[in-house]
Amino acid sequence: MAFLPGEVHALLAALTWAVALVLFKYSGERVAPLSLNLFKGAISTAMLLITIAIAACLLPNLDDASWRQLTAQPARNIWLMILSGVIGIALADTLFFYSLNIVGVGVISIIDCLYTPFVFLFAMLLLQENVTVVHWVGAALILTGVLIASRHKPPANLSRWRLVGGMATGAAAMCAMAFGIVIIKPALAGFPLLWAAAIRLAAAVLVMCAIAPFLSRNGGVSPWNVFRPSRVWRTAVPGAVMGTYLAYLFWISGFKYADASIVAILNQTTIIFAVILATVIVKEPLTRRKTLAVALAIAGACLTVMHKWILEQLPALS
């Protein structure tokens, strides 16, 4: 996947996650957050392992190089991947699904805006990345577009305290997600991509498997029920493929091949893709407000992708 710039990977992650978000919303209406997270994690882990096996058969030289890269990794990098999976997937995604079930897609898209500043914060504190004025302007354009596109009322019959609790849970999910990916940014440079993705997911799935039995005690609904074939698979399985396989690979490869702050900004275009998909597929009307939101987000994305060229031109203009 290295033949594409990291910025393109980040945009592809936003596009595929926009599709998955709608699918997960339908699935979440019938499945508990941890169960849905465990289900999509298990499916995606299996798909990643199958992908690694296929790559080993079809591209043995590339697989040998990846295996050598993996075995050459210090133990610290392996543990970082495991910790990242536990925090950034097992914890963050479960909190995210819980918040999504409470506040709905409209409000969660606003809460999702916290992801970028959290990545900025952790990138500056942990990676000493230089967040430039161009970054902030690009982020402001995208976030303005997101806020315009996602101006929705909260679900009806939702109490104020439940709304606040759902939003706080969503904010915690964004914080955990940002921290989980930023801490592995240095290790990703020399880490084989598929193995990094598989280790993070497998660690998250194992932790959720350890927690699941406690949830089914005292008459609770078993988290394992989601693995029985049912109608919910119609959205949960495609959601897992789009959101935790394709989007996940694009997302982590974006962080591998580009600065964390840039990837975070471009990831924020998910809601804009959701607006476009809703117009094309669901036939929702494309209002002036939505058109303005898409235009601002596209401008911000272009500004972010071209930030190096823009900074190079500034001295010549002055």
Image: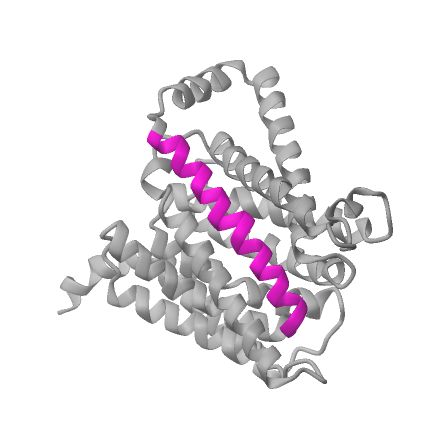
Q: How many marks?
A: 0
Q: Quadrant of the C terminus?
A: bottom left
Vertical position of residue 207 compared to residue 261: above or below: above
- Residue drawn 44% across the image and 29% down it: 192
Vertical position of residue 150 compared to residue 17: above or below: below
Point out residue 246 in the picture as x, y percentages from the top left corner: 60, 44
Residue 240 in view (yes/no): yes
Answer with left or right where residue 283 lies relative to residue 300: right
Which of the colour schemes (rainbow, by chain, secondary structure, one colour) is used? one colour
Vertical position of residue 115 compared to residue 211: above or below: below
User: Any magenta on residue 84?
Assistant: yes
- Residue drawn 57% across the image and 54% down it: 93
Quadrant hosting residue 105: bottom right
> Does the magenta stretch mainly form a helix, a strand or a loop?
helix
In the image shown, does 220 or 278 lie closer to the viewer?
220
Point out residue 152 in the picture as x, y percentages from the top left corner: 62, 81
- Residue drawn 24% across the image and 63% down it: 132
In the image shown, does 7 or 165 lie closer to the viewer?
165
Point out residue 74 in the picture as x, y percentages from the top left corner: 33, 26
Vertical position of residue 47 compared to residue 262: above or below: above
In the image shown, does 243 or 295 lie closer to the viewer?
243
User: Any magenta on residue 163?
Assistant: no
Q: State which region is magenta.
A: 76-104
Point out residue 301 in the picture as x, y percentages from the top left corner: 43, 63
Residue 291 in view (yes/no): no
